[in-house]
Amino acid sequence: MSGKDEAELSRLMRAAIAGDERAYADFLHRIAALVRGFARRKIVQGGVDPEDVVQETLLAIHVKRHTWRQDAPVLPWVYAIARFKLIDAFRRRGRRIEIDVDDIAETFAEPETETVSERDINRALDGLSPAQRSVVSAVSVEGRSIGETAAKFGISETAVRVSLHRVLAAIA
């Protein structure tokens, strides 16, 4: 890019900061083309979309435009932002795990007859006394209140609460 183009971009950015919307739109349009070319040259492998880098860069320019020193050339500032956004995109790609659905399709082909939580609950209930199991079943499964459960089994409400507390302590 020539010095004349650099000067024009700097002029557009100064006008944009001063509130000239048309200059800002022109600036962003020109910068988008430059950043797009930069991103395409730097991305040699798949996994990072150059358009994502362009959009992230334009957004950062918009948010941080007040940080540009107006006495400095604008392109080094723009390319620094683009470089950081490209690095961020590569980092995100590195954290992303891609799984081929066909490779794991057999894993989910047959539904389990019992879910993990059902298994855990059944295992915990198996360790209870018949009286405790009856109280838990009445309150948790049948939806009875403490008073209704006490009346059903002919025990006090306090005994129902104590039984539930002991069951929860045993399960935890």
Image (cartoon, rainbow, N blue to C red):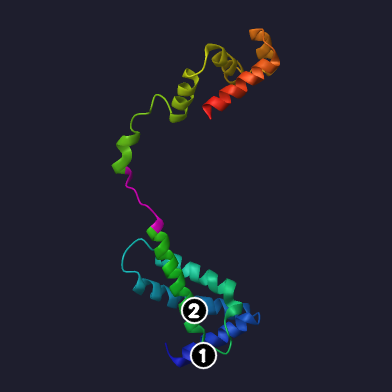
Q: What span is colored magenta in the figure?
A: 95-101
| SS for callout 2 | helix
Tell me the residue that label 2 is attached to. 78
Q: Residue at x 43, y 78 (%)?
A: 34
Residue 75 rendering spot, x and y as whole percentages: 48, 83
Residue 58 rendering spot, x and y as whole percentages: 51, 71
Looking at numbered disc 2 in the image, what kind of residue is underneath it? Val
**Which residue occupies the foreground of this view, 89 or 121?**
121
Q: Does the magenta segment cover residue 47?
A: no
Magenta region's main secondary structure? loop
Residue 30 rendering spot, x and y as whole percentages: 48, 79
- Which label number is shown at residue 83? none
Residue 131 rendering spot, x and y as whole percentages: 56, 12
Q: Quadrant of the N terminus?
A: bottom left
Residue 144 against residue 57 in the figure, above or below: above
**Which residue occupies the foreground of this view, 147 or 32?**
147
Marks 2/1 in contact by CB < 8 Å: the verdict is no
Dot 2 surroundings within 10 Å: few (below 14), some, or many (20 or more)? Answer: some
Q: Does the magenta segment cover residue 97?
A: yes
Tell me the residue that label 1 is attached to. 7
Looking at numbered disc 1 in the image, what kind of residue is underneath it? Ala
Report the mark closest to the observer, 2 or 1.
2
Residue 133 against residue 40 in the figure, above or below: above
Q: Residue at x 65, y 9 (%)?
A: 152
Q: Residue at x 54, y 16 (%)?
A: 133
- Is 54 on the left or on the right of 135, as rendered? left
